[in-house]
Image: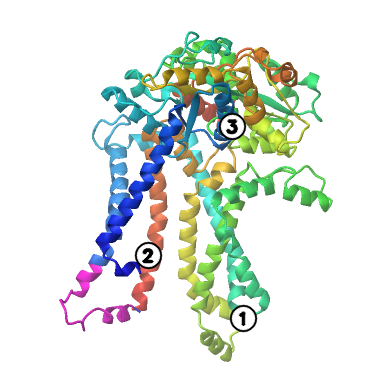
Amino acid sequence: MATQANTAAPTTSRGVRIPNSLLGYLLIAPPFLIMVVLIFFPAMQSVIRTLFYTPDGTLINFNLNRYIDFFQDPIAVSNLLFTFRVTLISIAVLFLLCFPLALYLRFSSSRIAAWLQTVILVPLFVPGIVLAYAMIRFLSGHGTVDTFLHTIGVTARYRSWYLKPEGIMLSLIWENIPFTIMILTAGLRQVSNELIDSARDVGANNWQIFWRIILPLIQRPALIILSLNFLGIFGSYTVPYLLGPAAPQMMGVYMQQTFTEYQDRAGAETQAVITFFSCAIVGALYVRAVTRQRVEQR
Amino acid sequence: MLGSRSPRRLLLHTALLLALVLSLASNITKSDAQDKIFLNVYDNGDTNITDWWAKTIIPAFEKANPKYKINYFIARSGNGIQNIIDRALAALQTGADPQVDMFSGVPGDYPDALKAGLFLEVNEKNVPLLKTVLPGAQLSPFGLPYRGSQVLLAYDSTRIKDSDVPRTFPDLIKWIKANPGEFVYCRPDKGGSGRLFVARAIYEVTGKDPSKFTADKVDQELVKQYPKAWDLLRDIHTSIYDNGSYPAGNTPTLQLLANGSVSMITAWSDQSLQALRNGQLPKTIKLAQLTDLPFPGGYAYQIIPKNAKNQEGALALANFLLTPEVQASAVTVIGGFPAVAWDVLPKEMQTEFNSVIAKSIPVWPEGQYQPAATKGWYENVATNIKQDS
């Protein structure tokens, strides 16, 4: 694919010749500049401020005071750990839920599979705020779940997930199903039928095909979706704003609260840098997975 | 056809047509303006407020004062009112007509305009009906309070007898502990109904004197007493709905009452009256106000710029807003609360709202009192860490 793109450059045109490389750089310049000006530059500014300035804005020597403050505040630490917990559990459940479904959608040609493929996309078109209020209705006391349990004869006192961590996880999982399925089925489609047929010809059973062929080939899409889900869930805001407990809170809500409600800009900045680095590590994994794929395809 | 004409000719024709239309239009307004005095009123209220103005207040005012006609502008988007104030400030400096006679807003939100002396002082001399306004409602001499809203107890009358509803704050605390899981208020930063419940707890531990908390400066001595309020609220933490679960907003709190998860909450008066009217809350939900010191509330204000061209008309409108007629419609049309004492309103209305009528409603200043209150609440009341109380 990469070689094709190179041959399509304007080498045959008779006018002014623009070198391929320059044209490429020109084309990526606007988005790159936007990234630098709106993302990298302010992010670096924030990092520098947290390391070299006091909360009231005076320049001092390099120090980690703000980070020490953060990690000595039991509430801040519990919010960070809570965010990791919610994120890791959610992406694990998402994967366990979506991988078998993606396998089914890839290898089944039944009408149910086609129908399911469409239905699964529905959450993609539901805005976060609508989802959050729907979940409140669904999970709340005398809501859908409660009523259903009552109808089938479960009369034990209903323990609502609405203001519990499970409420956040359930909503985020529901929200991220379509995207996860899309990436995983796309990944599975790269496993060609010929490959599987030939494996079967030499006597491999289903389990061996899964273990020796599909699983190694799906590693990269799996890594991609795990990291994308991590980034999306770690930084989620609307759902943990409306569902889940008042304490602990996820970092997105905690940052906003520190910034606007406590009017503590320096504190919010430190939280943001910590969140940013937590995500950057996973972001690096994602970038590695994607670039390795490009290199290999060449 | 158009293509065959020369562009210059087309332009000329368009300009002529435009000039004709404009001259006609200005003639119309001129002839209308000859016998009417126009008042320009700007409002940034929500649709329910602007509808109330357009359909109730303005027709009534124009009928009672035939020489005036109101140009009503909705300046809801962006910083609509700020733009109007900027324009009026510029006009004040040049002596021009600011083209605004009244607008909605809290004077304290516009320190620059206050400093420049843009706002007209309203008092009993130029707005006689101000004497009927509830004490404490007029926070600044430059703002005319004309509708209110307050936080109340909303309860399920099928589960709590009216006579058992607590009417003092200590009784409420006792009731909450005696009925674990039945009461809930929302997080103080996510909705006013929770914020003002917390504010009421702060009043309780600082001597029940709201006048100590003023908007202009923060008394650190009072902030130092917050921990007493945290002890009080931490004490009821496990008796709150679902072992201390606080919803994130006014509406989610109302939903918990509506679906029967709890039997008592704190709620905004206007929001609950509206929910009762449109059926979101069942008719069995009733409202009550504390009698020792009510839950705080807030008022909406109108401001008149000093350089208003029709100051006399603006003052007449200001006075009209405080008439029993308009004040009663605040209750019936928008589910608001009057800014005036209830006893000037119709008798049957006083009977209907008997359980929520208060002589004065404290106004919690928020401002610099709020960040410490919100932070203190999260760190000491709702926290999952401190388990020692």
> Nearer the observer, disc 3 or disc 1?
3
Instruction: Looking at the picture, tell me which residue is in the foreground, B164 or A66.
Output: B164
Instruction: Looking at the picture, tell me which residue is in the foreground, B141 or A186.
Output: B141
Residue B387 visible in the shown view: no
Q: Which mark identifies residue A206?
A: 1
> Nearer the observer, disc 3 or disc 2?
3
Q: What is the spatial separation of the Cα atoms under label 2 and label 1, in whole angstroms?
A: 31 Å
Subunit of mark 3? B
Point out the stretch of residues depicted in magenta: A2-25
Q: Amino acid at mark 2?
A: Arg
Where is residue B15? Give x, y as percent: 31, 52
Q: Is residue A1 above or below residue A253?
A: below
Kindly identify the residue that appears in the image at 77 percent across and 48 percent down. Answer: A147
Residue A67 is left or right of residue A107, and the answer is: left
Q: What is the spatial separation of the Cα atoms under label 3 and label 1, in whole angstroms?
A: 71 Å
> Nearer the observer, disc 2 or disc 1?
2
Q: Which mark identifies residue A288?
A: 2
Q: Are marks 3 and 1 in contact (CB under 8 Å)?
A: no
Residue assigned mark 3: B52
Q: Which mark identifies residue A92?
A: none
